[in-house]
Amino acid sequence: MMDTAAEAPDLPKLDEAAGERTTLVETLDYYRAVVVRKIWGMTDTQLATTIAPSDLTLGGLMLHLALVEDDWLDHRFLGNPDVEPWASAPWQDDRDWEHHIAASWSAAEILAQYRQSVARSHAVVSGASSLDALAVIGKSDGTNYNLRWILVHLIEEYARHCGHADFIRQGIDGATGD
């Protein structure tokens, strides 16, 4: 179980007059905080709980978002090899490995992995020369992604999964908000 003595992290304030890069990063950080607040205070068992008819869990969503962070920014954008635990995951046997393995991880392990992945992403974005910088690993058709597109895609990914987390959390203990 994660430390429930500490307060859930606050939602960051958004600067409504910021430039493009700051707006994208702040919006993504807002959704990152929302998803952490969705799991705050949950037990390991609660993080592994499904709400019918879905097999999604809060723990699985958190590991999925950690994977998304690492895959899009560290791996695709920078071109780095996959880091653990993704590098040795049996993706050929289980395309949704991160969702399924989460039930065997503690809440503290899930949150630590998520925070490590987000920290790597922050370093990548802050080190990028511009939003127009292209990913090292592009699409199979030869076209490429720029950092701007990747950040917008991550915002979309978080917005969708924060909605999933809302339903799962409410089904487990009735908590709503954010």
Image (spheres, grey):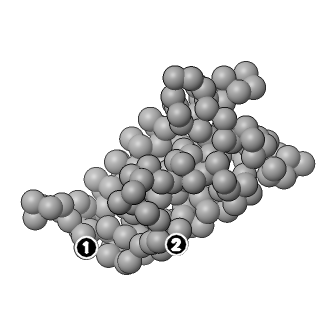
Asked whether residue 116 is in view, the answer is yes
Q: Nearer the viewer, residue 123 or 14?
A: 123
Label 1 sits on residue? 136
Q: Position of residue 167 (x, y in %)?
A: 58, 25
Amino acid found under the numbered disc labelled 1: Val
Please tell me whether mark 1 or mark 2 is closer to you in this view. Answer: 2
Percent coordinates x, y for residue 43 in the rendering: 78, 43
Residue at (75% x, 46% y) in the render: 44
On residue 84, the disc is: 2
Q: Check disc 2 and give the amino acid type.
A: Glu
Residue under the image location 41 percent in, 43 percent down: 157
- Cα separation, mark 1 vs mark 2, equals 20 Å
Depth order, front residue of 59/11: 59
The crowding category of the residue bearing disc 1, from other C-alpha atoms within 10 Å (few below 14, some 14 to 19, many at least 20), is: some
Query: Counting residues from the N terminus, which is met first, the one under dot 1 or under dot 2?
Result: 2
Q: Is residue 130 above or below residue 152?
A: below
